[in-house]
Image (cartoon, helix red, strand yellow):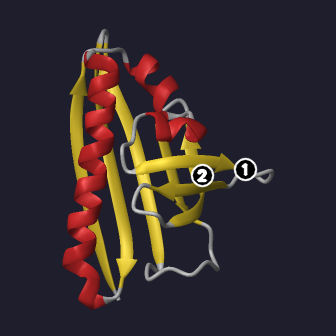
Amino acid sequence: MAIVRVSKTTHLPASADEVWAFVSDFAGYASWQPHIESIEMQADGDRKVTFTRGDSILDRITAQDDAAKSLTYGLVPGQPSPMKSLDATFVVTGEGAQSDVEYIIEVDVPDEMQEMARGGIGADIDGALAGLSTKFDG
């Protein structure tokens, strides 16, 4: 198994508070992340994420700090997946009417899937950050 970590940042013309309110809406990601077809929140707070490529996973928030504007979510254990683990984190920072959003995804995958995972994760992050730019740049 190998850890693959991809981190990218985008700059937005909106306050960190405004962006955080949007990013911390865990049920709303399908409205701005193009690789997500739908989200179905579960009674226990987990969410079922169905991707545009047809597969789905269950994930949950594992850490949230509203003061630091940081949210991390990960896979619900025990589901079939080539990934041993996935941790994805949004961090929103900024001053005044400007902010930055860093999106970090780290997965533990079989060695032979490292490059495929890096490419797929990078594309997912690019799509999510582009979705945020569309939302806040107009």
Viewed as shown, does residue 4 lie left or right of 80?
left
The residue lying furthest to the top in this view is 96
x, y percentage for residue 10? 22, 34
Which label number is shown at residue 95? Answer: none
Q: CA distance from mark 1 to mark 2?
A: 8 Å
Disc on the earlier residue, 1 or 2: 1
Give how far across and how far down residue 78 sits, in percent. Answer: 64, 80
Residue at image position (48%, 26%) is 22
Mark 1 and mark 2 residues within 8 Å of each other at the beta carbon: yes
Q: Residue at x 24, y 80 (%)?
A: 114
Q: Quadrant of the C terminus?
A: top left
Q: Residue at x 32, y 19 (%)?
A: 136
Q: Is residue 69 in sight in this rendering?
A: no
| Closer to the eye: label 1 or 2 | 1
Q: Residue furthest right?
A: 43
Q: Residues within 10 Å of mark 2 (few under 14, many from 20)?
A: some
- The residue drawn where x is 56% and y is 33% is 25
Kind of residue indicated by mark 2: Ile
Give the percent coordinates (x, y) of residue 66: 55, 32
**Rendering quarter of residue 109:** bottom left
Residue 79 located left or right of residue 127: right
Question: Does the rendering let one see residue 114?
Answer: yes
Residue 61: which numbered mark, if any?
A: 2
Q: Residues within 10 Å of mark 1 (few under 14, many from 20)?
A: few
List the residue tagged with mark 1: 45
Q: Where is 63 relative to 121, above or below?
A: above
Disc 1 on helix, strand or loop? Answer: loop
**Considering the numbered disc 2 on the image, is that residue within a helix, a strand or a loop?**
strand
Give the camera-side residue of 92 and 125: 125
Report whether 101 appears left or right of 85.
left
Total numbered circles: 2
